[in-house]
Image: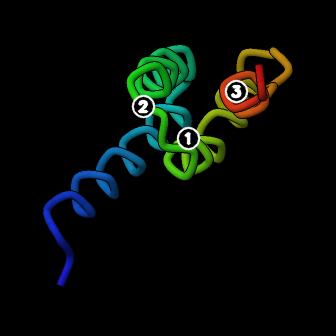
Amino acid sequence: METEDAGIKREFFEEAEAMIEEGQAEAVINVCQYLIGQTNDRAFIEELTPLLQPAYRQLGVPFRSPLPRLFSRR
């Protein structure tokens, strides 16, 4: 049985993938960047990568993972 949080996450990823297919990559990138800014959960940020890579590719922009910048030692 799927938990409510898992169901919401699954729906988010399905909707984001559909949006990328429909040419709405910029909206997906904006939402993902907002979510990244709201968390310090490395695993969740890594989960967003499969959405971000094709979205950036659709815009013709090289994708650079936010992880090194967010989790580098200062």
Q: State the residue at coordinates (33%, 44%).
A: 12
Of the 4 image quadrants, the one containing the N terminus is: bottom left
Give me the disc on residue 66.
3
Q: Residues within 10 Å of mark 3 (few under 14, many from 20)?
A: some
Q: Is residue 21 above or below residue 37?
A: below
Q: State the residue at coordinates (41%, 27%).
A: 35
Q: Amino acid at mark 1?
A: Ile
Q: Are marks 3 and 1 in contact (CB under 8 Å)?
A: yes
Mark 2 lies on residue = 39
Q: State the residue at coordinates (34%, 58%).
A: 10
Q: Amino acid at mark 3?
A: Pro
Mark 1 lies on residue = 45
- Give the CA separation, mark 3 to mark 1: 8 Å
Q: Earlier in the sequence, mark 3 or mark 1?
A: 1
Q: Secondary structure at mark 2?
A: loop
* Foreground of the two, 20 or 1: 1
* Foreground of the two, 65 or 39: 39
Colour mode?
Answer: rainbow
Q: Secondary structure at mark 3?
A: loop
Hey, which residue is sitting farthest bottom in the picture?
Answer: 1
Q: Are marks 2 and 1 in contact (CB under 8 Å)?
A: yes
Q: Residues within 10 Å of mark 2 (few under 14, many from 20)?
A: few
* Foreground of the two, 38 or 9: 38
Q: Is residue 73 left or right of residue 22?
A: right
Q: Secondary structure at mark 1?
A: helix
Q: Residues within 10 Å of mark 1 (few under 14, many from 20)?
A: some
Q: Earlier in the sequence, mark 3 or mark 2?
A: 2
Q: Amino acid at mark 2?
A: Thr
Q: Earlier in the sequence, mark 2 or mark 1?
A: 2
Q: Are marks 3 and 2 in contact (CB under 8 Å)?
A: no
